[in-house]
Image: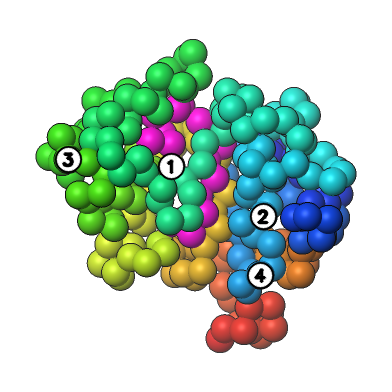
Amino acid sequence: MTDVLTVRELRAGYAGTTVLDGVDLTVPEGAVVALLGRNGAGKTTLVHAIMGLLKPYSGSIRIGDREMAGVAAHTVARSGVAIVPQGRRVFAPLTVEENLRLAAGRGRSRQTWTVERIYELMPRLAERRAHRGDQLSGGEQQMLAIGRALVRAPRLLLLDEPSDGLAPAIVTQIADLLDGLRGEGISALLVEQDLHLAFRLADEVTVMRKGQIVHRSPTSEFRADRARAHALLGVG
């Protein structure tokens, strides 16, 4: 199996400080890898570095066989990477339709996702297509953020805390939606605090601590080892 994402010896941070200290990470083609860790471990910093939103100090970030470390975010996006950012960050003054069509216009040339297909996948967005981003509920905004990423036809989807701030019933809907993407040829790196969501979606679990990857295993093995989960994450 080939790797869609390969990160090697990555160091990055802000204003000269080091947050990521020699990170090694891979996401195999067609797999979902959950990136877990306590607050402040460096998970979002890693996502931003992969997406080109943060220039690393050193190390390698490869999308397929292309080196992307330090490359601008729009170039990373054109290589087939899309992000669902923490906090959704939809364009509040634009309608659902405008948010989606704006993203679609920036997608890869070989388009496998269309706005109409997003509406089929998420009928609630079709119902709200004329509503502005700031008129949507939190769950609807998260659906829109996911749809906006998918319409770019990504090879790699970066999901940064998709359950953040959502009620449990809405998290279940989001989990159903993401679970339904299996078989679509999309690989994903999932940053998540909700372990139930992470365990449901992920094929593999990677744990970060103090800017380094300290554990990686199949999800089934990690779930079965409660002592390890408690030691790494502070949960039982």
Which quadrant holds residue 123?
Answer: top left
Magenta span of residues: 148-162
- The residue that mark 2 highlights is 45
Q: Quadrant of the C terminus?
A: bottom right
**Residue 169 visible in this rendered orientation of the protein:** yes
Q: Secondary structure at mark 2?
A: helix
Name the N-terminal-most of marks 3 and 4.
4
Identify the mark nearer the N-term, 4 or 2. 4
Residue at numbered disc 1: 182
Q: Amino acid at mark 2?
A: Thr
The Cα atoms of the two marked residues, 4 and 1, are separated by 30 Å
Residue 170 percent across, percent down from the top left: 27, 62
Q: Secondary structure at mark 4?
A: loop
Q: Earlier in the sequence, mark 1 or mark 3?
A: 3
Q: Earlier in the sequence, mark 3 or mark 2?
A: 2
N-terminal of the pair, mark 4 or mark 1, is 4
Q: Circle 4: is it few (<14), some (14-19), or many (20+) Cα within 10 Å?
A: few
